[in-house]
Image (tube, grey):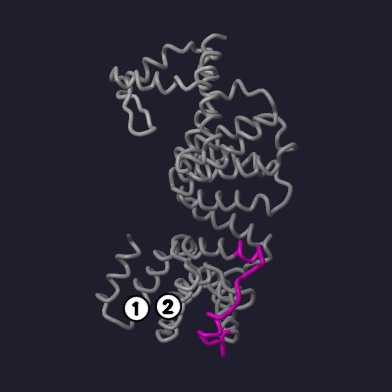
Amino acid sequence: NKSIQGSESCYGYSNLIEWLNFSALEGLIDCKGSMYKFVHDQIQLAAYSLIPENERGLWHLQIGSLIWANKSKSQKNALFIAVGQLNQGEKFIKKTRERVELARLNLKAGEKAMSSAVYTMAASFLKSGIDLLAGTWWVENYSLCLKLYVSYAEVCYCNGDFETMSLMLEEVFRHTECDKDNRPAHFTLIRALAAQDKLHSSIETALLVLEKLGEQFPSPDDKTVSAEYSKLKRILEGKTDTYILGLSAMENDEKNAAMQLLSFLVMYAVLARVKYLPLFSFRMVQLTLRYGVCKESAIGFASFGFLLCGSFNDIKGAYHCGQLALKLMEKLQAKEYMARIHVMVFGSIHSWVAHHRLSLKPLENAYR
């Protein structure tokens, strides 16, 4: 193939720089240091059109390989650019090992895009990774498939593509080998149901998952709530702020997962099943005292304070719990929960003990 052979020889000789400089003199590209860029998109498209269609994938493959091989020189965007190029040449990748490796790179690129909340880009990379592993890959590359499908389902939820999300979750539930592996998928499903205003279904699903995590909940009648409240007060007796703030980190994976679920549920219960709110809040505090602190512990104490100043008419206790929640949030660096914690502490508790104007700035910070 002459054009591909030509490209290989071109990359091997120093006259590549001469051709680039000639193109710059002709006004086709801009040169800034060692960086070259087409002066207009149409010029780039015209150059691209000169490459035969059946060869373009090979060019993309070669460009992607070169960029990735020299990624240390451009660490910021090398991953996205290289994987994007390699994906366009995917049909020319025949070896199983190379397809699996590209799927891993797509997962890495997708996760990096997710961390920056660029969900459309993340979806593109993750879907490409899944397409590369079409077939019986759940058996041969179980861990990789699990991460790709779970991440893609979460991105679809973030993009509001609930139909595709459901298909991905069905795949996960069909192939996962244990409850721990499908737990992230259940978390995505629970949040997605709530986002679609299916709060009752979301709570029911969460209660089933919590049962598997060893956290069962009785019917939330007045007698049960009163008994649970009395139980928690006995547990809290003699527990100072210093004691609670000094608790070790929660290391039990199942209880950590339960705390994450309960942090969703205290919010959903307010909107759909308010009778469950005390039980969810009490359990978060109990788990913290028994197994140690986690970021969600701040939500637990904030929601407990929220209940104390309302249902239980304990303003002093509510203020104390609210302050403890703020201290936990600061110590555990749980800034992702600041909005919810500030709404409960400054939107409810503080109004009972201080002028509401003093709560405006913290609420504004939470909004931002």
Residue of label 1:
350
**Residue closest to the eye, 9 or 235:** 9
Identify which residue is drawn at 38% across, 22% down. 20
Q: Residues within 10 Å of mark 2 (few under 14, many from 20)?
A: many
Quarter of image, res 130: top right
Identify which residue is drawn at 33% across, 33% down. 32
Q: Is residue 92 above or below residue 290?
A: above
Q: Is residue 64 above or below residue 325?
A: above
Q: Position of residue 233 (x, y in %)?
A: 56, 85
Instruction: Point out the stretch of residues depicted in magenta.
Output: 236-258
Residue of label 2:
322
**Residue closest to the eye, 106 or 315:** 106
Q: Amino acid at mark 1?
A: His
Please give left or right for residue 286 compared with residue 3 in the image. Answer: right
Which residue, as the protein is rendered here, is positioned at the far top?
Answer: 2
Quarter of image, res 356: bottom left
Element marked by disc 2: helix
Q: Residues within 10 Å of mark 1 (few under 14, many from 20)?
A: many
Which residue, as the protein is rendered here, is positioned at the far bottom?
Answer: 238
The answer to the question of whether label 1 and label 2 lie on touching residues, with beta carbons closer than 8 A, is: yes
Quadrant in which the N terminus appears: top right
Element marked by disc 1: helix
Which mark is first along the chain, 2 or 1?
Answer: 2
Q: Is residue 306 above or below residue 57?
A: below
